[in-house]
Amino acid sequence: MQLSQLFKVQEIMENNIKHLSQIDENELGKENIFDLRFLALQVKVGELANLTKCYKYTRMKEDIPKDKIMFRFIDAMQFFLSIGNQFEFNIINLDAVNKISTEQSLVKAFSGIFDDIKDLKYAIRIDNYVDSLNIYIKLFTEFINLGKLLGLTFEEVYDYYLEQGTQVL
């Protein structure tokens, strides 16, 4: 399994979407595209958090069908990969991802992801590539760990993503 394949599939899917939608990104402006990507990432991660209801301490945990979790997870992952492609973070590999320690609580995992999205956005804005790359690796790792906490193995996510990507292609 290579992360480079996921980044490549995402790039191809985005190019197809741009071609089919005939949206001129130059008309939207770089700053708007930048904010759109990060807002979309936050929304998709939020939708995943909402699905789990982990933030509601008064509710008992429900069994959520794995296909629903996988769908929301992949939906968010597309934006992680998109940002990785856009800012040339697509050079990361699984070794870098596996070296970072991870959370054991859904609430802390989601909170850390939201904090790091904000930090990544800031580091990119000030044009600090090294910090941006390090934050991105940490963020990507936290997201993969979130999948594990939700009962998804990286292998399942990887296979599902490639399968879905080839259907779109």
Image (spheres, rainbow, N blue to C red):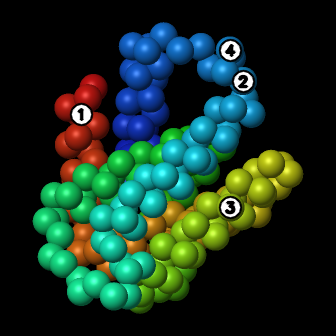
The three-letter code of the residue at mark 2 reads: Gly
The answer to whether the residues at label 2 and label 4 have Cβ atoms under 8 Å apart is yes
Q: Nearer the viewer, residue 55 or 144?
A: 55
Looking at the rendered image, the quarter that the N terminus falls into is bottom left
Residues marked 2 and 3 touching at CB (< 8 Å): no
- In the image, residue 167 sits, relative to residue 68, either above or below, namely above
Q: Quadrant of residue 48?
A: bottom left
| Disc 2 element | loop
Q: Say which amino acid is labelled 1.
A: Thr
From this view, report whether residue 6 is shown above or below residue 61.
above
Question: Which callout, 1 or 4, points at the residue further toward the start of the chain?
Answer: 4
Numbered label attached to residue 52: none
* Percent x, y of residue 17: 41, 22
Residue bearing mark 4: 27
Q: Mark 1, residues whose alpha carbon is within 10 Å: few (<14), some, or many (≥20)?
A: few
Query: Which of 130/127 is in front?
Result: 127
Gap between marks 1 and 3, in whole Å?
A: 31 Å
Q: Are marks 1 and 2 in contact (CB under 8 Å)?
A: no
Q: Is residue 99 visible?
A: no
Task: Give the residue at mark 3.
Answer: 118
Distance of label 1 from label 2 (alpha carbons): 30 Å
Which amino acid is tagged 4? Glu
Q: Position of residue 101 (x, y in %)?
A: 52, 85
The disc at residue 29 is 2
Q: Determine whether the residue tagged by mark 3 lies in a helix, strand or loop.
A: helix
Q: Which residue is mark 1?
A: 166
Which percent across, then down, holds residue 44? 43, 52
Query: What residue is rendered at 58% in x and 47% in y?
Result: 39
75 sits left or right of 133 in the view: left
Which image quadrant: the C terminus?
Answer: top left
Q: Is residue 126 left or right of residue 131?
A: right
